Image (spheres, rainbow, N blue to C red):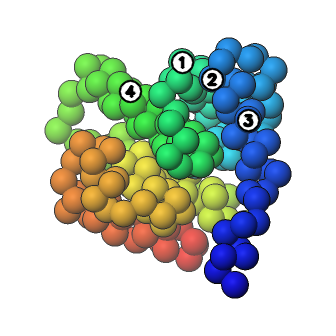
């Protein structure tokens, strides 16, 4: 039985996807457009969950695909293209957050950082808050760790490496995010 399974050719879908990536790597704009159309929804969703801003998510999605075009030659096919693109998207968003943090740090110097956090913005008290809205209202650090860990399935060690922080910091951010979500959803 095992030998029979080994003789079955790969699915046409995998072959077509691999060929599309190879054509795009060779500079075929039509193949890259096909990759874009196949993956733009998932990339946008990830950018939206991490940024909590639809306009910014659109910009980040475009940044991801620009970076994808620039780095496509480095894709070696050791994982699925969608996995590689997902990791690239996470890196683009986190890189943007880091540079945003530097810009904000240059502008704001305060002894009261909680004053500038976005958590606790009151929603419409007449309507129950949904999960997506609650996630969008989390402070950026807590939101990022929550999305990467609980939604996307990354481990604390991976998130800490992406953020350039300690594992304990990521765990604390996740705990904070979960607490804030519980409070928001109980309202």
The residue where tag 4 is placed is 100
Task: Tell me which numbered mark, 4 or 3, is placed earlier along the sequence.
Answer: 3
Question: In screen coordinates, is 136 left or right of 74?
Answer: right
Nearer to us in this view, 151 or 30: 30
Residue in view at x 19 percent, y 54 percent = 166
Where residue 81 sits, quadrant-wise, is: top right
Residue to which mark 2 is pinned: 25
Q: CA distance from mark 4 to mark 1?
A: 22 Å
Q: What residue would you read off at disc 3? A: 19
Q: Nearest to the eye among marks 4 and 1: give it.
A: 1
Which of pointers 4 and 3 indicates the residue nearer the eye? Answer: 3
Q: What separation in Å lies between label 4 and label 3 (alpha carbons)?
A: 37 Å
Point out the tag, 2 or 1, that comes first from the N-terminus.
Answer: 2
Are there few (<14), some (14-19), or many (20+) residues within 10 Å of tag 2? some
Query: Looking at the image, which residue is at 59% across and 48% down?
Result: 80
Q: Earlier in the sequence, mark 4 or mark 1?
A: 1
Between discs 3 and 2, the one toward the N terminus: 3
Q: Residues within 10 Å of mark 4 (few under 14, many from 20)?
A: few
Q: Quadrant of the N terminus?
A: bottom right
Q: Position of residue 6 (x, y in %)?
A: 67, 69
């Amino acid at each position: 039985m095992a030998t029979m399974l080994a003789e079955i050719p790969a699915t046409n879908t995998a072959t077509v996807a691999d060929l599309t990536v190879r054509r795009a790597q060779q500079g075929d704009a039509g193949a890259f457009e096909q990759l874009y159309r196949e993956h733009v929804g998932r990339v946008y969703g990830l950018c939206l969950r991490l940024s909590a801003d639809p306009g910014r998510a659109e910009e980040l999605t475009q940044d991801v695909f620009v970076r994808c075009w620039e780095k496509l030659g480095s894709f070696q096919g050791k994982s699925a293209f969608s996995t590689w693109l997902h990791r690239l998207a996470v890196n683009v968003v986190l890189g943007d957050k880091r540079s945003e943090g530097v810009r904000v740090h240059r502008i704001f110097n305060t002894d009261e950082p909680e004053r500038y956090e976005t958590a606790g913005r009151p929603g419409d008290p007449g309507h129950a808050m949904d999960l997506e809205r609650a996630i969008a209202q989390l402070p950026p650090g807590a939101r990022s760790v929550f999305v990467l860990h609980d939604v996307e399935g990354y481990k604390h060690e991976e998130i800490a490496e992406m953020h350039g922080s300690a594992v304990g910091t990521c765990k604390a951010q996740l705990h904070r995010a979960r607490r804030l979500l519980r409070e928001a959803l109980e309202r």
